[in-house]
Amino acid sequence: MQPSSAEPRGSDWQRKLRRFGPILAIVVVVVAVIVIAASGGDDSGDTEALSEGTGELDDETSAPETTDTGTDAAVETMPEGTEQDPDDNATVDTGLPDGVMTFSVAEELGLDIDFGQRCDEELGTLAVPNFFAPECVAPFEGDNGGATAQGVTEDSIKIVWWTARDADPVLSYVTSAILNDDTTADDEHTMHKLVEYYETYYETYGRDVDLVVYEGSGNINDIGAARADAVEIAEEHKPFMVWGGPTLTNAFAEELHARGIPCIGCGPGQTQEYYVDRPGLAYTITKGPDQLNLLVAEYIGRRLAREDAIHAGDESMHSKERVFGRIWIEASAASAESNRQFEKALRDWGVVIRESQNYVLDPGTLQESASTVIARMKQAGVTSVIFNGDPIAPREFTNEATAQDYWPEWIVTGSVLVDTTAFSRTYDQDQWANAFGVSNLAARVDRVIGGVHSLYVWFHGEPPRADDNIGVINPTIQTFYSYYQLVGPELTIDNFRDAIFAAEPTRRALTAPSISYGYQRIWPPGLEPDYRGIDDVAEVWWDNTVRGLDEIDRDGVGMWRFVNGGQRYKLGETPLGPPDAFVLEGSVTIYEQRPDDEEFPDYYEPLPAR
């Protein structure tokens, strides 16, 4: 099926919004709690600035034909906005959707518009202490169209936020490893307070989000409960959109999409075909498993293949050419397919996996699985273990490797939370001293001086109740409000998709990933249109000697170091030659001061909550 889409480059309103894209703020501290399983663990998520690569298509390039999605309307073009010319009262074309006026367009047209106290008119961005503050959007006045879609009225947008139960044993098994004590009630309180912040500063066209918190009826891997939750949400709440969902089954998302309800981050990653066949109904903030496969294969092919295993813990391996093994999590046919895709991508670089072993995230059998897997890696002569799975299993695998006196290189691949300091401190530290690879996460900034935690304290005057989870909660909310500003008052499923596709990739930085959707020519043609967000990775290595705070402010020894200050790479940008892992010079664990190119005004006083 061809994707439904407005023209990705041909129409003027989209070119205007693409200039807005680089200053959308999508700051991911920890991208997800555990977005693994069905995608094989690859849908993960949670940098000296590179030159911006917009990847724009030529104006005359046409998009695939629009198809009927079953949503409010299959939009071919967006209505163009108008504004009064201050000189002759004539109507002028703004090149934006009706009701949308950005600071740069108003300035370009010479329009005298009061953007209000929420705007820093010297910078043209929101008056908030954040380098990634988006461009100001003029306050909307007039008729917003009322009920433009299901769950949308003149003054509200109904959104359901799905949250896991406190008693979920699978999730508790994961979070207990890092002593995360945030409760569902803490998360809910923080979510509502974040909505207050966004609706005070971001343009919402006369509507407020009517947020319904829905606690899951089963565990995060319960297929039956997931389907039942989705049906109840669809039939009883009838929302415009859903945020979040059970992270170990696709059933929840599939039921929602069958009923024409879009969602952001409502389950593990799907295949590209899934998104194309359901245009405008599913988005993730992280990259997809097929995308990450290509980036990791490129890293291994350009940096590690045909070189000696000099970072192994066993010195006898240092003079041996790397022999690669793979440990990966299996939960469905999708994870097996993802593994096949990855191994094919490696073969394209001339790299063969000597030993491939899968495991299941089951607390009752994980130790036994680890014993068998490690024995097979050792017997096969694997010098370099490529790990792709959940954040708990490396504890068992590294402990077992030590027990069997097996000391390989551990190559991390951006699988969710494995590349966080909080979880990595739970692994065997003598083993993990040989860990390096790529991370979806960006170089960290002390959360007192940057990121959503500091914004929350600045706006509300107190820390969030979900002190540990705020970095997980925020990205979905921020994604919605950032792009809703560009939709305008005519909020529909298709218009939301068209706005998110029209924006450029977010600005490239050391302390945040670059995010984009749609047709950007970042990925091979078969992976566009892109409904998955993060486009780049950083190179990291584990330093088991340095002391500092982890992502949830717990002091300890051992931290991830980001190579070259956190420099990030998109597909095709990975440098040739040996990795910079274990090179202390230029690496950073956490920025105690913001990078020079990412400074922002800190003189703002917050506006009262709207």
Image (cartoon, rainbow, N blue to C red):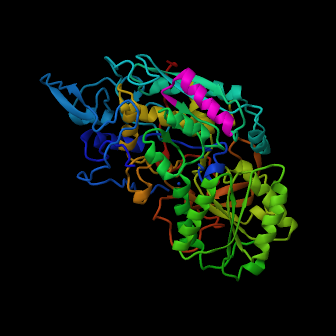
Q: Is residue 41 visible?
A: no
Q: Position of residue 569 (x, y in %)?
A: 50, 59
Q: Is residue 173 left or right of residue 150?
A: right
Name the residue at the right extreme. Answer: 403
Question: Residue shown at 32%/33% (left/top)?
Answer: 103
Q: Position of residue 44 (x, y in %)?
A: 60, 50
Helix, strand or loop for the magenta stretch, by majority: helix
Residue 448: name its quadrant. Answer: top right
Question: Residue shown at 75%/44% (left/top)?
Answer: 174
Residue 67: name its quadrant. Answer: top left
Closer-to-camera residue (597/174): 174
- From which residue to which does the magenta span run? 223-241
Closer-to-camera residue (517/504): 517
Name the residue at the bottom extreme. Answer: 319
Q: Is residue 364 left or right of residue 419?
A: right
Question: Residue shown at 34%/20% (left/top)?
Answer: 144
Q: Is residue 351 visible?
A: yes
